[in-house]
Amino acid sequence: MKELKVQPIKDGTVIDHIPPGNAFKVLKILGITESLPDSVISIAINVVGKRGKKDIVKIENRELKAEEVDKIALIAPNATINIIRNYEVVEKRRVEVPDEIVGIVKCPNPNCISNTKEPIKTRFIVKSRQPLKIKCYYCEREPEDISSLIM
Amino acid sequence: MNFKGRDVISIKDFSREEILYILDVAEKMLPIAEGKKKSNLLNGYIMASLFFEPSTRTRLSFEAAMKRLGGNVIGFAQPGTTSLQKGETLADTIKTAESYCDVIVMRHPKEGSARMAAKFASVPIINGGDGAGHHPTQCLLDLFTIRKEKGQIEGNRVALLGDLKYGRTVHSLAYALALFKVDMVFISPPELQMPKEVIEECREMGANITIKNSLEGLDEIDVLYVTRIQKERFPDPEEYKKVAGSYRIDLKTLENVKEDMIIMHPLPRVDEISPEVDETKHAAYFRQTFNGVPVRMALLALVLGEIK
Ligand SMILES: Nc1ncnc2c1ncn2[C@@H]1O[C@H](COP(=O)(O)OP(=O)(O)OP(=O)(O)O)[C@@H](O)[C@H]1O
Ligand SMILES: [Mg+2]
Ligand SMILES: [Zn+2]
């Protein structure tokens, strides 16, 4: 039987398999509340699925593109992006860590220029995906505990 | 090779061939740097020298380099005299300065500041030190000195001595020497050892690396590069004294070294090298300091496109 813990939508995007409790962070990283002020967005938190608890976000009337969604890979590495057309899942994609991570991770180096009031976003170059290794574009520090640095 | 408009932020932005080319140009600058020949190569150009942190050698040698080539210099030597104190961002200071000049040389206490400045400026940025980050012109003048003193960079056995853990300029130097597959000996107190990543990177690049905790075996060394061990690294001042004392270079430590071994030091020194060593033929550190001028002349002429 089809698992439908959230209200069905006709067209749009469902972001599934977000680690429980991270739905709001996903929305924040996507910046969706600002960029899509007229979209209806529903979220479900702590949904019990086949593989334990998860969060789900669904966005009506908007098909998110890969490069928009890949930004969430840091906090939701197992998320799936489901494109819904006429109530059916017509496309399913996994997120991928992008080559650069901009404005999401804070540099742990207190003396880094990105931790000052300069008009720049934090920027990390992805050196490896498995295991995830990133390097600050500015000070070249390679943080250990990346998840604790997500802004 | 075209360097026109290029930023000089980290030595890693340059290939081995590009580094050698810069050193070749620096070689040609020597008579002008010494004041024996006059030049108007950079006549009409303005260099902004923005020192948000004090420096003697780097700032003076950049300014001398620009002036020796007939160029002009504007700028400040400490942030106290700028609107930075009124809270202006570095980005805004850079955007202002670039409208008055053709090239910016900067030193700033924050790591990554020069990289950021390069994003805001359309004129080339030359990094004169960004906190504990990079100092590429020091690295180039070190390579220039080794080549000038020893004939070539390859084939030497180079010892890096002192604080190898925190001194990032010594990390860049190790990397640059590894580009030339130089044999290196890293000598430091155990608590100030070269970081593992640097050692691994140098080895992957094909350099032969030995790690030591004492000054023994200096007789096999061709170039001894001494750096400062900073007091701040030691919680106990007595411990600092003991450690610093055991790495001090004096006439006695030099008893068995090769005739033509040279000693380098980025200066300023505190007491890593006893003043009596200055009189020996091993002491290359004052010549090294002078070499900052031709190397910086070469970089200025290259990034301004007056030498191709
Ligand atoms: N029309 C729709 N409206 C809202 N959500 C939907 C709609 N269709 C599917 N979904 C949701 O999209 C997600 C993916 O749907 P799908 O039918 O592919 O489930 P699945 O087979 O369990 O997939 P997976 O293996 O990725 O978990 C599920 O969370 C599902 O509830
Ligand atoms: Mg499912
Ligand atoms: Zn940083």
Image (cartoon, coloured by chain):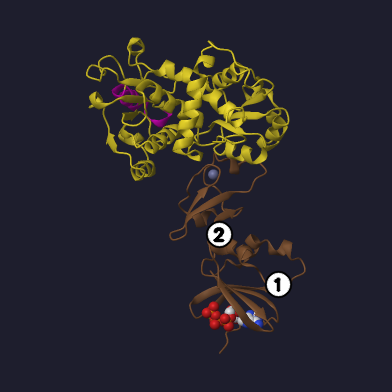
Chain colours: A brown, B yellow
Image position, residue B12 (x, y; %): 48, 39
Residue at the image point whose x is 36% and y is 41% from the top = B202
Q: Label 1: chain?
A: A
Which part of the image, by quadrant, shows the C terminus of chain B?
A: top right
Tell me the SS state at disc 1.
Answer: loop
Residue at x 64% of width, y 67% of height? A65
Q: Tell whether B241 sits left or right of A26.
A: left
Confirm if mark 2 falls within 8 A of ligand 3.
no
B259 or A12, nearer to the observer = B259
Q: Earlier in the sequence, mark 2 or mark 1?
A: 1
The dot on residue B42 is none
Few, some or many C-alpha atoms within 10 Å of disc 2 (few <14, some 14-19, many ≥20)? some
Q: Is disc 2 in the same subunit as disc 1?
A: yes
Q: Nearer the viewer, residue B21 or A59?
A: B21
> Tag 1: residue type?
Arg
Q: Which residues are magenta?
A: B232-247
- Give the side of residue A74 with respect to residue B49, left or right: left
Compared with B6, B301 (above or below) is above
Work out which residue is located at the far bottom of the displayed protein and give it.
Answer: A1
Q: Amino acid at mark 2?
A: Pro
Q: Secondary structure at mark 2?
A: loop
Disc 1 marks which residue? A62
Q: Quadrant of residue B146?
A: top left
Q: Position of residue B196 (x, y in %)?
A: 36, 43
Q: Is residue B292 visible in the rendered structure shown here?
A: no
Residue A98 tag number? 2
- Residue B238 shown in magenta: yes
Q: Is residue A90 magenta?
A: no
Image position of B184 with respect to A134: above or below: above
Above or below for B149 versus A74: above
